[in-house]
Image (tube, grey):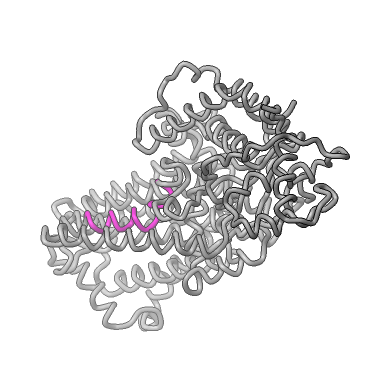
């Protein structure tokens, strides 16, 4: 799978093609984040069941019966309920910024959610998701056995961050036309310029001498910002 | 077109689309419906335009910020438009009345194997223990056996109970928690090349057979059989169905045919999930019968045998005819 031009070839980003003819990137979640999500869920479930037992056990055998039914539901259907009705994420996954989707990136379907969660019984073997962990290391998509069979993946949720503003500078046309990679690099530099320390910003700017025509960091930094202003099409004010 | 002009031209459109997505997300987390805003009807077109903008932005090498923003919008729209439909109430009815029995008929070969693996040891043990009663101690510890015998004491006014567990509702909880769990484990065990399923089917077959054989031979025949008769059809069939679902997973791994193993597993699981829904439903009803009907001693054993037989006839008729051209 070759990466799209102008993107990094990260091995945990999986592109899926949509019927509209664009590629969406699934950012796959690894074992650590998923284990944390599972622990949070476990804590929630245990706390919930203990709290319920305090209320229900004193009610005698009727209460115990209700508690056992709830235990069954919490043990097996808790993840299914959240995955199907709450946007593909249990509370633990939500806190960790994860969600379950089908292989094609669509929201997880019901049968898939049931399947991947029933198969936890096998993934859990011999202890603490041993099989699931080994399985996750053996395929490219960090799938445990349940994910393989259900055709699902766990991905990081797209989070929006505040759009950065490219600092204003008089636009400057490059001496030779920029390639796609170059113009992207210039833009990304300009977008990040405000978050870098001046020293680092100048150090980075000193690298593309071909674009800036100077090795002097401060001057190169200004030139790059000017180039960026040209690339995004700002007019001379 | 330069990036800034592009952003300026589509800014309003994008903000509206993002606004709709945010509203949808908020509504979902509060459990409500997506608000019916002015642009709701145009979402498919607008989503396609966002996709087009994303493709353009990437192709023209626009900055990461704008590409990421469009990507987020496209993902949001994709999730909104390509979600699975919420099943209607009639879909559940259709599953029970025709889809599930038809599915079971379609799996009759797998089902026969699962039934043999379960009922074989069960019947074998019952027969064997009539002639060699002591063999039961190879399977069940004497203390446990004594406990089981107590549950079917002919003098008891409720069958299948121990003094510590003497409420119908409590036993209902126990049966749900225990029996449906066994069904789920039997299904999941199929992923170990079918060995897990094989283990659960054989183990439960031998165990139930040992209990039944021993109690029959030891003089508890009437109490035991009148207890199990009522729920036997639903419960045993449910276990066999979950076994069949597990065997399908196992077979997909052992003999995937012309598919890759992963693809074969996905196909098998999609069918298997239907069997598991049905099996869980049957075990739920079985748990109810087992908790509230089976322990009653007010009815003569003959009545309870009759009900049990009717259960078997009903289950057989359901799977033979429901949803078929002849039966509908």
Residue A194 locus on image (x, y percent): 58, 48
Q: Which of B295/B52 is in front?
A: B52
Against B72, is B174 above or below?
below
Q: Which of A223/B188 is in front?
A: A223
Q: Most prominent secondary structure in the magenta stretch?
A: helix
| Rendered-image quadrant of the C terminus of chain A | top right
Residue in the image at 35% along x and 35% along y: B31
Against B101, is B214 above or below?
below
Against B5, is A15 above or below?
below
Residue in the image at 53% along x and 60% along y: B116
Magenta span includes B247 = no
Q: Is residue B197 visible?
A: no
Residue A94 locus on image (x, y percent): 43, 50
Residue A19 locus on image (x, y percent): 69, 31
The range drawn in magenta is A66-81
Q: Which of A143/B138 is in front?
A: A143
Residue A38 locus on image (x, y percent): 44, 61
Left/right placement of residue A208 relative to residue A144 reads right
**Residue A86 occupies which quadrant of the picture?**
top left
How many numbered dots are placed on residues in this image? 0
What is the residue that sits farthest to the right in this orientation? A176
Left/right placement of residue A188 relative to residue B163 reads right
**Residue A184 occupies which quadrant of the picture?**
top right
Against A25, is B13 above or below?
above
Residue in the image at 68% along x and 59% along y: A140
Q: Is residue A208 visible?
A: yes
């Amino acid at each position: 799978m070759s990466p799209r031009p102008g993107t990094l070839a990260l091995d945990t980003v999986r592109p899926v093609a949509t019927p509209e003819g664009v590629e969406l990137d699934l950012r796959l979640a690894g074992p650590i984040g998923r284990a944390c999500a599972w622990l949070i869920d476990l804590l929630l479930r245990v706390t919930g069941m203990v709290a319920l037992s305090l209320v229900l056990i004193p009610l005698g055998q009727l209460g115990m019966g209700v508690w056992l039914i709830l235990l069954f539901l919490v043990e097996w259907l808790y993840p299914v309920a959240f995955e199907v009705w709450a946007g593909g994420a249990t509370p633990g996954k939500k806190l960790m910024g994860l969600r379950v989707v089908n292989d094609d990136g669509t929201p997880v379907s019901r049968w898939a959610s049931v399947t991947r969660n029933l198969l936890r019984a096998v993934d859990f073997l011999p202890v603490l998701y041993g099989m699931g962990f080994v399985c996750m290391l053996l395929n490219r998509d960090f799938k445990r056995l349940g994910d393989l069979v259900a055709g699902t993946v766990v991905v990081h949720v797209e989070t929006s961050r505040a759009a950065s503003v490219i600092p204003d500078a008089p636009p400057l046309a490059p001496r030779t036309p920029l390639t796609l990679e170059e113009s992207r690099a210039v833009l990304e530099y300009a977008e990040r310029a405000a978050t870098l320390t001046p020293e680092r910003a100048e150090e980075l700017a000193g690298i593309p001498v071909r674009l800036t025509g100077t090795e002097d960091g401060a001057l190169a930094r200004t030139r790059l910002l000017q180039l960026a202003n040209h690339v995004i099409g700002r007019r001379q004010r | 077109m330069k990036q800034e002009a592009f952003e300026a031209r589509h800014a309003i459109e994008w903000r509206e689309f993002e606004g709709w997505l945010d509203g949808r997300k908020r509504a979902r987390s509060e459990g409500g419906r997506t608000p019916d805003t002015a642009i709701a009807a145009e979402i498919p077109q607008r989503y396609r335009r966002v996709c087009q903008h994303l493709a353009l932005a990437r192709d023209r090498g626009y900055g990461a910020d704008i590409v990421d923003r469009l990507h987020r919008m496209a993902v949001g729209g994709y999730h909104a438009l390509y979600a699975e439909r919420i099943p209607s109430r009639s879909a559940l009815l259709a599953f029970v009345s025709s889809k599930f029995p038809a599915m079971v008929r379609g799996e009759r070969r797998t089902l026969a194997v699962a039934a043999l693996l379960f009922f074989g040891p069960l019947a074998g043990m019952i027969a064997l223990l009539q002639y060699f009663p002591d063999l039961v101690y190879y399977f069940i510890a004497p203390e446990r056996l004594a406990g089981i015998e107590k549950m079917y004491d002919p003098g008891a006014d409720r069958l299948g109970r121990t003094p510590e567990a003497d409420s119908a509702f409590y036993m209902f909880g126990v049966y749900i928690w225990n029996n449906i769990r066994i069904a789920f484990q039997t299904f999941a065990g199929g992923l170990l090349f079918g060995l897990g399923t094989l283990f659960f089917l054989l183990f439960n077959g031998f165990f139930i057979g040992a209990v039944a054989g021993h109690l029959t031979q030891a003089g508890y025949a009437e109490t035991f059989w009148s207890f199990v008769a009522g729920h036997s059809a639903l419960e045993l069939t449910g276990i066999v169905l979950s076994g069949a679902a597990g065997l399908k997973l196992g077979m997909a791994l052992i003999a995937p045919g012309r598919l890759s193993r992963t693809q074969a597993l996905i196909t098998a699981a999609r069918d298997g999930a239907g069997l598991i829904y049905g099996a869980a439903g049957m075990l739920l009803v079985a748990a109810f019968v087992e908790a509230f009907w089976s322990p009653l001693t007010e009815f003569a054993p003959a009545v309870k045998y009759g009900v049990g037989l009717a259960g078997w006839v009903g289950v057989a008729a359901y799977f033979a005819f429901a949803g078929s051209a002849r039966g509908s």
